[in-house]
């Protein structure tokens, strides 16, 4: 289930529920009414928003008693404000608003509320709590997941170190601030992490992020990680680094995880990771799973090839370290001193020469990727266990 589908179904469903609630025994005239729903979309430049529009229009077409009016804010606050004002004048029965920025749309949203129009705010919030419902993800939670992973990539808790470039979304949007705040809840605890830029906004766009990263590369010889507030910006940073041959030295993290966008970028090795709000999707799936005739199947989780390769190296290193530690302990127990490795190999690959006839030590190490969460439809992965086993021979003096 794609993020845009989740928003589309939840938003239109909420609006339809509201308009349906207006039908009461005392309103007989309402039975013949065609319900008019306005949708103020911030832009159609972003591919997922263009597809969102197609999906929500297709959903509305299934309801002959609904007229859906979609406007395009052209990524300009003043245009979107005018669009919403026009929808208010048309006396729509419900209003969906996906704001470009929080403060800029708050006033006109309040106008709609004052006009007794149910208002549903999508994806980005506004600076009032008087609207009917917000439909969107927990961006601070997403930021926390990205921040925790960044710390892991840069050396782990208490040891993380590196230079980080953060490319903001729109400075006036709540998701950008939430994604920043959540990320820094983890990274700010690490004294070794340094931030190279001071709140530079790519406005959610790939080309602007490219320019920001190109300038950062010119003025900084060492960049270890890029955190883009969405996948297109992280990808724009990747392209800038690739153009100067530095992409392999940098980790790129994005947000949104759309199947045909961020997920594909991760699969191709262009982004290191992308994050989305699985908890919101899990809760929503639990709600719809009770619908008659609808069946939700199991979710299968896999590590990406890059992640599996990295974890396998870490586990193999841990297995060798354990083997050395045990050998040293055994030597000490019989009064010997320092041990030196003679051979270390995967299980079954040690030589069988007479010279190497000393007893073998078989050691295994494992790492489980963390998981959490519960529920009828669990969108948190079970632990994925990666193991490594080694055989070793040592000499002790």
Image (tube, rainbow, N blue to C red):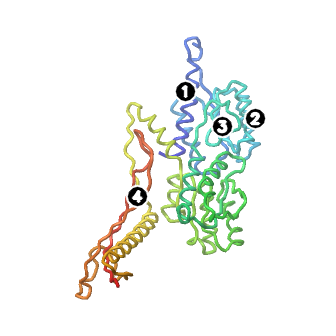
Residue at 59% across, 51% down: 143
360 over 356 or under it: above or below: above
Q: Position of residue 363 (x, y in %)?
A: 32, 69
Residue at 58% across, 26% down: 18
Mark 3 neighbour class, 10 Å CA radius: few under 14, some 14 to 19, many 20 or more: many
* Disc 1 and disc 2 in contact, CB within 8 angstroms: no
Label 4 vs 2, first from the N-terminus: 2
Q: CA distance from mark 3 to mark 1?
A: 17 Å
Q: Residue furthest front?
A: 335
What residue sits right under mark 2 in the picture?
Answer: 107
Q: CA distance from mark 4 to mark 1?
A: 43 Å
What residue sits right under mark 3 in the picture?
Answer: 97
63, 184: nearer the viewer: 184
What residue sits right under mark 1 in the picture?
Answer: 17
**Element carrying mark 4:** strand
Q: Position of residue 122 (x, y in %)?
A: 62, 39
Label 4 vs 1, first from the N-terminus: 1
Picture quadrant where residue 220 is located = bottom right
**Element carrying mark 2:** helix
Q: Is residue 381 left or right of residue 244?
A: left
**Element carrying mark 1:** helix
What residue sits right under mark 4 in the picture?
Answer: 368
Q: CA distance from mark 3 to mark 4?
A: 42 Å
Q: CA distance from mark 4 to mark 2?
A: 49 Å
Label 2 vs 3, first from the N-terminus: 3
308, 22: nearer the viewer: 308
């Amino acid at each position: 289930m794609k993020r845009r589908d989740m928003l589309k179904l939840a938003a239109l469903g909420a609006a339809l529920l509201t308009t349906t609630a207006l039908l009461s025994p005392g309103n007989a005239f309402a039975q013949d009414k065609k319900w008019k729903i306005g949708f103020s979309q911030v832009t159609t430049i972003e591919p997922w928003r263009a597809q969102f529009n197609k999906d929500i229009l297709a959903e509305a077409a299934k309801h002959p008693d609904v007229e859906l009016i979609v406007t395009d804010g052209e990524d300009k606050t003043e245009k979107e404000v005018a669009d919403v004002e026009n929808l208010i004048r048309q006396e729509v029965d419900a209003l969906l608003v996906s704001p470009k920025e929080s403060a800029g749309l708050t006033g006109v949203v309040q106008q709609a509320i004052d006009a007794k129009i149910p208002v549903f705010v999508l994806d980005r919030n506004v600076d009032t709590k008087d609207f009917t419902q917000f439909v969107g993800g927990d961006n601070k939670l997403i930021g926390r997941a990205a921040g925790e992973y960044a710390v892991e990539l840069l050396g782990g808790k208490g040891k993380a170190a590196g230079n980080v470039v953060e490319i903001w979304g729109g400075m006036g949007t709540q998701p950008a601030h939430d994604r920043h705040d959540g990320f820094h809840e983890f990274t700010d605890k690490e004294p070794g992490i340094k931030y190279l830029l001071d709140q530079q906004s790519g406005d959610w766009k790939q080309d602007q992020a490219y320019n920001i990263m190109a300038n950062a590369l010119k003025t900084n010889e060492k960049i270890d990680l890029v955190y883009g507030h969405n996948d297109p910006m992280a990808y724009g940073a990747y392209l800038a680094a690739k153009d100067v041959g530095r992409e392999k030295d940098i980790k790129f993290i994005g947000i949104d995880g759309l199947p045909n966008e961020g997920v594909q970028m991760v699969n191709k090795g262009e982004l290191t990771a992308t994050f989305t709000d699985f908890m919101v999707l899990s809760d929503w799936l639990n709600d719809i799973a009770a619908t008659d005739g609808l069946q939700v199947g199991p979710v299968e989780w896999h590590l990406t090839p890059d992640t599996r390769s990295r974890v396998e190296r870490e586990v193999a290193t841990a297995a060798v370290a354990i083997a050395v530690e045990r050998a040293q302990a055994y030597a000490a127990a019989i009064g010997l001193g320092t041990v030196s490795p003679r051979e270390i190999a995967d299980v079954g690959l040690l030589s069988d020469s007479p010279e190497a006839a000393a007893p073998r030590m078989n050691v295994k190490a494992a790492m489980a990727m963390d998981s959490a969460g519960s529920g009828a439809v669990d969108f948190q992965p079970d632990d994925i266990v990666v193991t490594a086993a080694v055989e070793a021979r040592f000499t002790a003096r």
